[in-house]
Image (cartoon, helix red, strand yellow):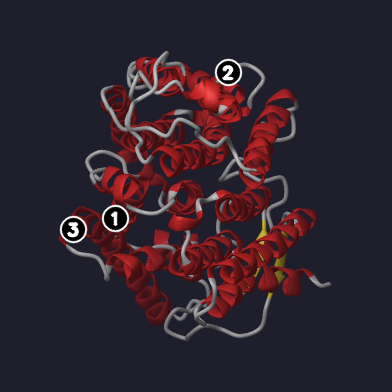
Amino acid sequence: MSPTLLLVLLVSLPLVGALLLTVPRQHTSARITATGTSALTLGLAIAALLIAGRETPASGTPGPWLGATWRLGVDDASALALPLTALLTLVTIVASPRHSSGQRFLTALLVTESATLGFFCARDLPLRLGFFLAMAAPLAAQLAREGRAWRPVRAYLLAGTLPLMLAVALVGLLSWHTGVETPRDSLVRDLPHGWRMGLCTLLLVSVCARLAVVPFHSWLPVLMTRGPLCVGVLWMNLAASLQLLTQVIRPLLPAEWATVAPALGSLGAGAALYGALLALVQADLRRMLAFLLVSQSGLLLAGVTLGGPTGLPGAWLQCLSMGLTFTGLELVVRAIEARTGTTNLDPRSGLTVRAPRMATVFLLLGLAALGFPGTLGFVSEDLLLRGTLGANPLLALPLLPALALNAITLLRAFQHTFLGPRRVPSMPACTEDLLPRERWTMLTLVALLCVSGLWPSVLAHPSIAPGATRRSPPHSIPGD
């Protein structure tokens, strides 16, 4: 199979599965269709690892006004993101409770996966921005059917979409005006400083809204508390935002990036501490995970902007670790809710006796999330803190208490949820432990975290971080 055909199939297969799910069918049939599509996509994503760093142009252009061609390729950073995106999608479909994974949810998840894979494979700026824009479309379509309770989510979704649409229109207009086939660094650097700063501002506002960085964070607790399973989708947006910062904004607008990077780093460090403080005082597991994600997003932003050569690969590894740990933690929380009817942190739960496997998986994922030695989180946090504190010790100082508070929050959640001595009277006397499909998918996540933590030499190589590659194909976006 040619590399071009492989990547085209990789991007389009989830979309084909989503189209099949638009036909009304039984719930079991819908899950089988979604699971089969995700499994095939994962196989193609693993095959894409073999062509990392090779550009694979395809024929045709999406439109002359964009000045873009359909060029697909996989660099070393994208090669890691592709199978992880497919894996998280598959794990979410297989292990999610049946009542929270209806046909609409499965369709939206597959569409988001297709857009995310397209973003990581795209090698033209307008095409990449278009895929980044499409990643929010499934969530927006779902919220369009909801009521006023979702106004905060819709507002911040709009804040993350409109600036990006203006940036795409600006890039397309410049390409049409200059006649340049592919807008790259030469086109952007010829702009006046005011235009470059305006483009940089539009992209940064959109990225910060997608990252749920303070003050663009209010939508995340609402979505986590009232919405369907979403950590996998949130990670896709987070990983894409991280690459947009390091592979588009930073290389195309270096002067503007140097101007705003200290402020962005301070914002990220403050957001990490702010999210950690709010997570510590939550009495609901869903809201606790939401504010932990806010804290982790701030940590990543600080690592990218303040970390230098060491912090950049550390931030990318932390992003990969977050995808595995928080997806698993949310699945455990949803399993608890499906069995007990609540996600409150009640010290009288005592679930360890009735669900020991569930307690073990939650503890292992929690330890991985707080950076326990032997896990990927330990390696990533070490690189990220070494880079940020070494380059900007004062600006990055809030990261230390933020990480300590996150550890306290996760251990407190485990103690209150699983180690209580008494049972809540309203809770079922016999709580079912993890089902086989839940158990094996979550153990897969734990195994990946441990294996990558014990043998991090390949993943920790600086060349796989966004913005640096071993092999830079010609005619690609700088940093690809």
Which of the pair 453/358 is nearer the observer? 358
Q: 10 Å neighbourhood of mark 1: few (<14), some, or many (≥20)?
A: some
Q: How many marks?
A: 3
Residue 193 disc label: 1
Q: 10 Å neighbourhood of mark 2: few (<14), some, or many (≥20)?
A: some
Residue 372 disc label: 2
Mark positioned earlier in the residue sequence (3 or 1) = 3
Identify the image quadrant of the C terminus.
bottom right
Cα–Cα gap, marks 2 and 3: 38 Å
Q: Which of marks 2 and 1 is in front?
A: 2
Q: What element carries label 2?
A: loop
Cα–Cα gap, marks 3 and 1: 36 Å
Q: Name the residue located 58 percent from the left edge and 18 percent from the top edge.
A: 372
441 left or right of 211 in image: right
Q: Name the residue located 64 percent from the left edge and 72 percent from the top edge.
A: 13
148 left or right of 305 in image: left
Image spot of residue 65 (x, y percent): 42, 83
Image spot of residue 387 (x, y percent): 51, 23
Hey, what amino acid is under mark 2? Answer: Phe
234 left or right of 466 in image: left
Q: Is mark 3 on a helix, strand or loop?
A: helix
Which of the pair 81/243 is nearer the observer? 81
Which of the pair 369/338 is nearer the observer? 338
Q: What element carries label 1?
A: helix
Image spot of residue 199 (x, y percent): 31, 59
Would you say residue 179 is visible in this rendering? yes
